[in-house]
Image (cartoon, rainbow, N blue to C red):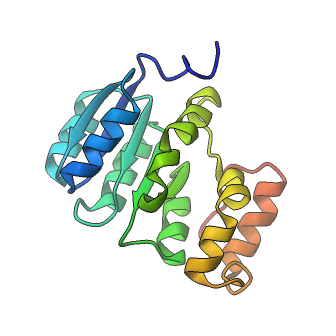
Amino acid sequence: MNSESVLIGKSVLAVDDEPDILEIIKEQLDGCIVHTALDHDTALQYLQSYTYDVVILDIMGVNGFALLKSSVSRGFPTLMLTAHALTPEALKKSISLGAVFFLPKERIADLKGYLKEIVSGGGKPIWQRLFERLEGYFNRKFGPDWRERDQFFKDFEREVLKGAERPSAA
């Protein structure tokens, strides 16, 4: 299967309180079956009623962390997409709750590529890609030593490099 076809026909739930973000996601994933929700209650109904290959959740405005718990409990690979909750704490919480990736909305143009990696990797976390490809971005946002200041991230990086999927919360 080539990289362009890996997403064709995949079922995706995208949840965001900004309709324009949902439109961008639908345009990027034109070969997918994309359900969209603008609020927590609608998203929860979708999560309880359908099966998804990937779920994309905003954090703010839709109670994204509660939705993340529901999505992960159903076994759906879940990517967090955020602008306002772009903090080391939100990243740590996303990891701890079982998200497979965390993407700033400023980098939404890269979404399709990351989803291809998630789907072709069987829904496994791709956190190493975050640290490889977005290191400079996060260093500018959080400060160059943001990972060294938090034991969680030091432990996480050590476990990721060893191939662990997700550490327990510190």
Q: Would residue 10 appear left or right of 48 to someone viewing this image?
A: right
Q: Quadrant of residue 140?
A: bottom right
Q: Is residue 10 above or below residue 59?
A: above
> Which residue is pictured at 74% across the width and 82% down the height?
148
Q: Is residue 10 above or below residue 141?
A: above
> Which residue is pictured at 68% across the width and 69% down the height?
136
> Which residue is pictured at 56% across the width and 21% down the height?
4
Along the viewing direction, whichever of 19 and 151 lies nearer the viewer: 19
Say which quadrant the C terminus sits in: bottom right
Say which quadrant the N terminus sits in: top right
Q: x%, y% of residue 34? A: 30, 29
- Total tally of numbered discs in the picture: 0
> Which residue is pictured at 70% across the width and 78% down the height?
147
Point out the residue furthest to the right here.
162
Along the viewing direction, whichever of 13 and 133 lies nearer the viewer: 133
Q: Would residue 74 appear left or right of 119 to someone viewing this image?
A: left
Q: Is residue 170 visible?
A: no
Q: x%, y% of residue 89? A: 50, 77
Q: Is residue 51 visible?
A: yes
Q: x%, y% of residue 144? A: 70, 83
Q: x%, y% of residue 149? A: 69, 87
Q: Would residue 42 appear left or right of 63 to someone viewing this image?
A: left
Q: Quadrant of residue 8?
A: top left
